[in-house]
Image (spheres, grey):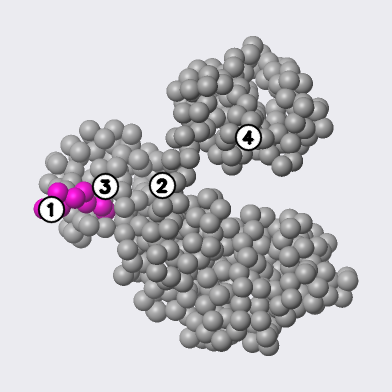
Amino acid sequence: MDACARGAERVAAADDVFVVAHIDADGISAAAIAALTLDRLGKKRRVGFYPKFDGDAAGDVNSSPESLVWIVDLGSGYLSSIKRDGVLVTDHHVPERNWRKGQTQLDSFNAVVHVNPHEFGFDGSTEISGAGVTYLVSRAVDPANADLAYLAVIGACGDLQDSKDSGLVGINREILNDAVATGGIEVARGPRFFGRDTRPIRQFLQYSSDPAVPGLSGDGVACSRFLEELGVEERNSDGSRRSWKDLSPDEAERISGALLALLSADDAGKVFGENYDVPGRARGMGDAKEFATLLNSCGRYDDAETGLGICLGEPGAVEAAKENRAAHRRNIAGALDYVKKNGLVRTRRVVRYFDSGDAIRDTVVGIVAGMLLNDGNWDMPMIAFADSDGGKKVSARADRSLVSKGLDLSFVMNAAANHVGGDGGGHAVAAGATIPADAVERFLDAVEDIVLAQLI
Ligand SMILES: [Mn+2]
């Protein structure tokens, strides 16, 4: 791609660089590729993470003092909000509509180099990720950066680009070849369930889904019996539990054969495929999908920087990420306890709800609503309120059985929020809204009217 060469020129010519990245695994991997590329050139750089390319991000981009802003896994949808010179965008999201194909200058005449697969007829949802596009520019800067290809594989797996075809396809395939050639990735064929590196082998089978394995998925006892019949020990000689990656090739082969016998040909094609080992890594990072999950968890807990530290090999970063996750779990347990102890849940005609005020963070309240739903009545949606900067943050959760009866929380949240001057949306089973702080009762009235209408 000629665009990659243009991007590389920009990078080489820059004095100092502000890297702007998305907070998910793909964005963090992309940021790591950009940061390492710049470090190797001896350029001064700074990295900023953003959950979306909103006004804050655009403001920071436009006011950054650096000679180049390199936006990774973000930005394509918002090119017109960039009002400065010296911008490189390496992204795979669908470009903003008023950005004309092949255009290298915005109407405001600010020069932006935009590298995006959609401009070249590739599918940005399966064929290349944000980290992948960033990698192609990095490789154009210096072919020796091919050793960073493994990060682009992790980014692509983070964006689930390996799911549809049970392996990477398109330009991702070329990037994978670089990663294998430089020793960053080893391709391992086998079942693609989550947790090859960390889950005990029984749970690895038990939690399999999409598609489920008849007789095994969801049934731990059956999984243990299955392993026993195949002569596969669940524990190592020191008593620790064995994961899929601890198995001998022969044991893995036996399990694979037995799994195949349980699956239809169609489902076998979905269960079996390529996995990507990341050799020489600590447990939890030895599989590209699990590595990506670790990065995603950092981003979700407001700590994408730790994820970047993990990719850059900073000492202590992995421990920090694990501590983050433990703190998050404690946080949720405490919040759940708070709602229960104070008897906050109220039941109305057709919904249950609680208002945690400022006691529970608005990023956690939806998770708490989902957990309450699980141990309470499944026949009513759960609506949770929390104070936030912009008013009341609302999170709604419902059991799938209600959705199959016609409930659509996305529509409910959107319509009820609009009714009181707020905004909302999401999915049928999980949705959210932001409403004026004094509108809770009116909002709930509207919610109930709509839910009733949907469930009649
Ligand atoms: Mn992405």
Residue at 56 percent of width and 26 percent of height: 398
- Percent across and percent down for residue 155 are 51, 63
- Quadrant placement of the C terminus: top right
- Disc 4 and disc 2 in contact, CB within 8 angstroms: no
For residue 200, the mark is 3
For marks 4 and 3 on the same chain, the one whose residue lies earlier in the sequence? 3
Element type where label 1 sits in the image = loop
Labels 1 & 2 near each other (Cβ < 8 A): no
Q: Residues within 10 Å of mark 4 (few under 14, many from 20)?
A: few
Amino acid under disc 4: Asp
Nearer the observer: mark 3 or 2; the answer is 2
Q: Type of residue at label 3?
A: Pro
Q: Nearer the viewer, mark 4 or mark 3?
A: 4
Does 237 lie within the magenta span?
yes
Residue topped by disc 2: 326
Start-end of magenta stretch: 236-244
Residue 319: image location, x then y, percent: 38, 59
> Which mark sits nearer the N-terminus, 4 or 1?
1
Residue under circle 4?
358
Where residue 47 sits: x, y (%)?
Answer: 60, 69
> What's the mark number on residue 238?
1
> How many C-alpha atoms fall within 10 Å of the one at disc 3: few (<14), some, or many (≥20)?
many
Helix, strand or loop for the magenta stretch, by majority: loop
